[in-house]
Image (cartoon, helix red, strand yellow):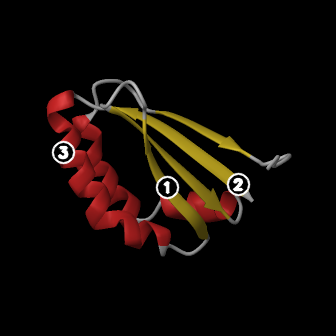
Amino acid sequence: MLIRTVRMTFEERNVKEFLEIFEESKQSIKGFEGCLHLELLQDYHLPNVFLTYSHWENDGALDNYRHSDLFEKVWAKTKPLFSDKPVAFSSQRLQTID
């Protein structure tokens, strides 16, 4: 399983628009083949900083999403709202401690 985290910083005036875009697209993203889990997180101290946290079956599933019409559509709406370049990380879980 591949875990993808993307940190996005938005212009404060664009936060509401980003949240609307996420709300309208979250079910399609979660329903995309190979997507196992999707969360939206907000920085505790910086309300214009968000992270998407998603689980994918593998690299191929994430790549299929990143090259899909759905991603292109969502990204085209989201990209102009940033105040800083997004940062993405792909990782794998080694341990869970409860």
Identify which residue is drawn at 31% across, 56% down: 22
Image point (44%, 65%), residue name:
68
Q: Residue furthest front?
A: 98
> Residue 40: image x %, image y %?
44, 50
Mark sitting earlier along the chain (1/2): 2
At numbered mark 3, what does the secondary structure look like: helix, strand or loop?
helix
Residue ranking furthest to the right: 95
Residue 17 in the image: above or below residue 85: below
Q: Position of residue 67 (x, y in %)?
A: 48, 59
| Upstream in sequence: badge 3 or badge 1 | 3
Q: Which residue is mark 3?
A: 16
Give neighbour class at mark 2: few <14, some 14-19, many 20+ (Cα, 10 Å).
many
Where does label 2 land, which residue? 2
Tell me whether circle 2 and circle 3 mark residues in contact (CB < 8 Å).
no
* Quadrant in the picture for the N terminus: bottom right
Q: Of the two numbered discs 2 and 3 on the same chain, state the one appearing first in sequence.
A: 2
Which residue position is annotated with label 1?
39
Crowding near the residue tagged with mark 1, few <14, some 14–19, many ≥20 C-alpha atoms within 10 Å: few
- Label 1: which secondary element: strand
Which amino acid type is marked by label 2? Leu
**Mark 1: which amino acid?**
Glu
Q: Amino acid at mark 3?
A: Lys
**Quarter assignment of residue 36:** bottom right
x, y (%) of residue 88? 54, 37
Q: Residue at x 79, y 50 (%)?
A: 98
